[in-house]
Image: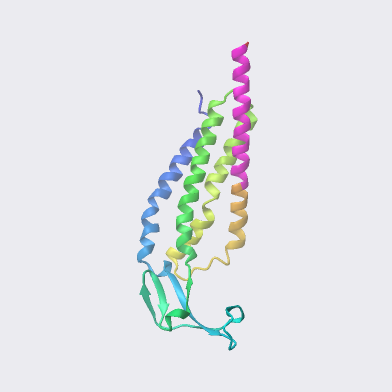
Amino acid sequence: MNLSMGNKNVVLGLVVIMVYMAMSFFIERTAALHGFHSKAAGVVVDTKGTVDLLDDQVTDIRRGPAYRTGGIYFTNYYPASYVPVPNSFRDAGYNMRLYAWIFALFGIAVGFIVGVQTQASKGLRSCASWLAVIGVVLYPVRDAVYFWGRWLNPGFSPAGVGPVLYPIIWIAGTAMFVALLLSLIVFVEGATHAAAKGVS
């Protein structure tokens, strides 16, 4: 067994798991931060004078002094008019950690396969290894920018960076998919060579 080809994948995967595990402190800390709470707005509904709910229309969104109930901030209007507004920045923290761990495990798996199957094509093994590195590093970037952007700046808006970040995660997701596909081919090729060698 020779892991020289997949060493970087295994090491990078373990480092990513540890780094994003350390971020758990900050992710859980958001429960106490106003900027990461779900909120609600009081709305004015025009019923059109009928009991049919399908023709109701929201005509105004009222804002006022907020109070907290169960982690949700409400405005001081009639409770039935409250419309919850989820906070995507807190979700981004959980997604950041989850995707980082999943892709790190994928990267470690690719590293073991390309390292163990030494009889398979060296070009395929190298390509799978580097594509896995790209996927592990780049896929959690979007959620990391959203989470840390809000953490460092309560007025952060993802609108400016969104058009740049989404292509990055598409590229990263594609890279990891191709890496896994190539590692499957490498595994089958290596196993076939090993079986043929054993028969001969």
State yes or no: residue 33 in magenta.
no
Q: Residue at x 59, y 48 (%)?
A: 172
Question: Which picture quadrant has residue 34?
Answer: bottom left
Return the residue nearer the eye: 82 or 3: 82
Asked if 32 appears above or below 59 in the picture, the reply is above
Q: Which residues are magenta?
A: 174-199
Name the image colouring: rainbow
Give whichever of 111, 188 is nearer the camera.
188
Please state which of residues 166 and 46 is positioned toward the viewer in this rendering: 46
Q: Is residue 172 left or right of residue 14?
A: right
Q: Is residue 192 magenta?
A: yes
Give percent across and percent down for residue 167: 63, 55
The relative height of residue 115 versus residue 179 in the rendered view (above or below) is above
Please say whether residue 122 is visible from this viewpoint: yes
Residue pictured at 43% horizontal, 63% vertical: 151
| Type of secondary structure dominating the magenta stretch | helix
Residue lying farthest to the front in this orientation? 51
- Which residue is pictured at 59% across the width and 19% down the height? 194
Residue at the far bottom: name it.
49
Residue 5 appears in the figure: no
For residue 144, side relative to residue 131 (left or right)? left
Looking at the figure, which quarter contains the C terminus? top right
Q: Height in image: 144 above or below 4?
A: below
Image x and y of residue 152, in percent = 43, 64
Residue 59 % position (x, y): 57, 84
* Total numbered labels: 0
Query: Could you say where residue 136 lies in the image, as x and y percent from the top left?
Result: 53, 45
